Structures are given as C-alpha cells and as structure tokens.
Image (cartoon, helix red, strand yellow):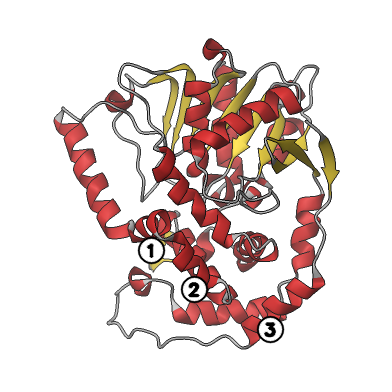
Amino acid sequence: MSVKPFTIETDEKRLSWIKTRIESAAFPPQIQLGAGEDIWAYGADVDYMRALCAYWLNEYDWQDTVDELNRFNHFTAAIDGYDIHFIREDGSGDNPEALLMSHGWPGSIYEFIEVIDRLAHPENHGGKAEDGVTVICPSLPGYGFSSAPSRPIGQVTTAALWDKLMREALGFETYIAQGGDWGSVVTGLIGLHHGVNKGGGCKAVHINMYGLQASKAPTSDEEIAWATGFAEKMQAEGAYLQLQATKPQSLALAMADSPLGIAAWVIEKFHGWSDVFTDDGRDIAKRFTKHQLLSNIMIYLMTDSFATSIWYYRGYFEELPHIPEGEKIEVPCGIGNFAEPYITFPPRSLMADDYHIVHWNDYDTVGHFAAMEDPPMFAAEVQQFLKKL
C-alpha cells in the first residue's frame, strides 16, 4: 500500500465556475411568517442565504481555507482500489497513541482542524505533552479529496478500509477510533469487526452520536419514551435521509449546477443540528462564522463530491450495518453525549448490552458538529476518555 504526500491545490477553472453560478443565482420567495415564528423550520432562510452569497462573492477567499488545511501534513494511501486522503499529525510525547477520527455528512475533515493540534500537542493549549496522540483524519470514500467509488458503498466497507489504513498502510499495531455522524457508525463497526479481540487493531472507540444501533428493544418507561421521541424526530427531520438513501442520483442531478442549492441543503443541517439557541431564538452565528460554513461547503464544491457523498446513504441501506443479536462491541467504548437535537443517545441501559461502556459524559450544550462548535470542549471530552484507557 503506497502512501504519498498530498497538497491541496486550487482548480482555478472550477473556482471561476462556482463564482459565476453564485453571481447568477436565482432565489425563491421568502416565506412570510408572524412574529416569533422560526423561518428555518421551513428549510433554509432565503434572507440568510442571500447574505451568505454576498459574503461568498465579496469577502470569502478559498485560498484562506486551503492555507488552513495545508498547515497540516496531508497524504493519500492506495487501499483496495481507492486513494484515501488523510491528515496525519504526529503527537507529542515519547510514545503517542494513534487516534483515528472519522467525520460524516454534511461535514468533512474541516470539522477537525481546530481540535487536531489540541489532541496531538496538548502542551500548546495548557496540557501536558505526554498526553498527545498521533491524529489521523481521513476523508470518507467519495468525500472531499478521497477518490470515489463507482457505485454506492457504505460503512461496513469503510470500516475495513480504515483498519487497513491504520495497520497495513501506516503500520500502527493498535489504535483508538473516534467518530460522529457517519463516523460514529464507522467507528462502531471498527470496534465490532476490527477490535483487537477480533484480530484487528482497534483497542477502543469513542463516539459522539448514536450511530451503530443497539439490537435490544426498549423495555423500561425511560427507554420507550426515548424511542417514541426518536421516531418523532426522524419523521419530522428525516426526509433528506430517505431521499439520499433511496434516490440519491436524482438529488445529485438537481444540485449539479447549483452551488447555492448545495450550500442551502448543507447549511440547513448545520443550523438545525447544532446548539445555536439564544435568548431570541436560534442564531447560526452563535457557533459558526460564514467562513467556516463556506469552507466546509467549498470542499464539496471544489472536489465535485456532493453526489458521491450522498451515495453513502444508499450504501448504508445496501450494507445494513448493525450489531447482531448476541454480539457486542467488546473493546472499551466512550460516549460524549452532547446536546444533539436530532439523533439523540438512548438511555445507557439500552446500549449496555451492545457496547462495553467505560466512559459516559452528558452535556447540556454543543450539538451534532461538536468538534467544530466548541473545539476546546470536544478535545477535553476525548482526552478525558483517553486518560481512562
């Protein structure tokens, strides 16, 4: 498996096309609501998207994002026919553990750029050098700078790729896996199928979203109440998932010529899934700058990977990852239960038969994109779990 250095470069023709499309973007009418009603409840706020596009054209510079990313060492690894892109930051200390961090949709490696140094070099942030870990952040297949499959693949395939990346391509005998969103499913599968107890290299997992589902049915009043609420949220918010999991190519065609459409589709999730609550309602600026939001979106646009990223949902339903009855993730598991408003963790009792839980923290702030919403809090959560190991 060949590992090669990689530098993010700019395709000026692609960049010019994006700018032209934003300049000529057409906006739908804004829905008119009464005082106190939430415009985002109907989808992306048209007025916000107009302001974002003005910033996009007049202030945002893709090169600033490239420079942010290129301050880290990037590589690609040839694994099973894919060129997998990843960031590697070697940790401080005499013998740092390896930490594999996986993002999801509609995120990217950009979610982690403010936590990588905190985890690899804690001495730069008031911690101790010996607590540093070597951080590996890959782009999922079909996302960003990783190559795309020719047809949808899912999380089972990715978990196997990641174990090969860590052990065969990079030579780590053991490693710890962490993930949120799709990354939590991949991480769970790594622990299930590629743990050290199964002959793999994963010695522990940490997740900040309920990804790989437990097999146990809810029985207690608390568990049943959670399951009812979970189903209601999926009914209210899960239409995107059903579309991307059943007919992703139709959505891909609709978005192929519309950077504005992709931006609205993605930003609505950042608004809806994050801790953006204020005394006056919800304000996305509480957690994200326009630069941050556009940096994440532009990774999709500059690599033309929106279509192949949503294939990943179809891949989920084709591979159907789950914890089979009678099996368990045997390696130690940590839970960072942030204030996720969408896919919430069940009561601990519902997960205990399927996860070897050694760490569980509940938070009343920070949401789905925890690493990006509050980097110090997220890094501290992961470090607390690592110290328990």
Looking at numbered disc 2 in the image, what kind of residue is underneath it? Ala
Which residue corresponds to the image point at 60% horizontal and 24% vertical from the top-left? 176
Local packing at callout 1 (Cα closer than 10 Å; few below 14, some 14-19, many 20+) is few
Sequence-first disc among 2 and 1: 2
Name which quarter of the figure residue 201 lies in: top right
Q: Residues within 10 Å of mark 3 (few under 14, many from 20)?
A: few
Residue at 49 percent across and 73 percent down: it is: 254
Q: Determine the secondary structure under disc 2.
A: helix
Location of residue 136 by image quarter: top right
Mark 1 or 3 closer to N-term? Answer: 3
Disc 3 secondary structure class: helix
Q: Nearer the viewer, residue 63 or 94?
A: 63
Residue 226 vertical placement versus 173 (above, below): below
Question: Can residue 106 be seen here?
Answer: no
168 displayed left or right of 33: right
Q: Position of residue 110 (x, y in %)?
A: 65, 52
Residue under numbered circle 2:
254
Q: Residues within 10 Å of mark 2 (few under 14, many from 20)?
A: few
Asked if residue 234 is positioned above or below residue 167 in the image, the reply reads: below
Can you say whether 277 is above or below 52 in the image? above
* Circle 3 residue: 20
Q: Nearer the viewer, mark 2 or mark 1?
A: 2
Which amino acid type corresponds to the residue marked 3 in the rendered image?
A: Thr
Residues at marks 1 and 3, CA–CA distance in whole angstroms: 38 Å
Amino acid identity at mark 1: Asp
From the top left corner, tell me how far across and down residue 192 is, in percent.
Answer: 47, 22
Provide the residue designation for mark 1: 279
Would you identify the image quadrant in which residue 195 lies?
top right
Task: Report how far apart the C-alphas of labels 3 and 2 lie in the structure.
Answer: 18 Å
Please indicate whether residue 118 sits to the left or right of residue 2 in the image: left
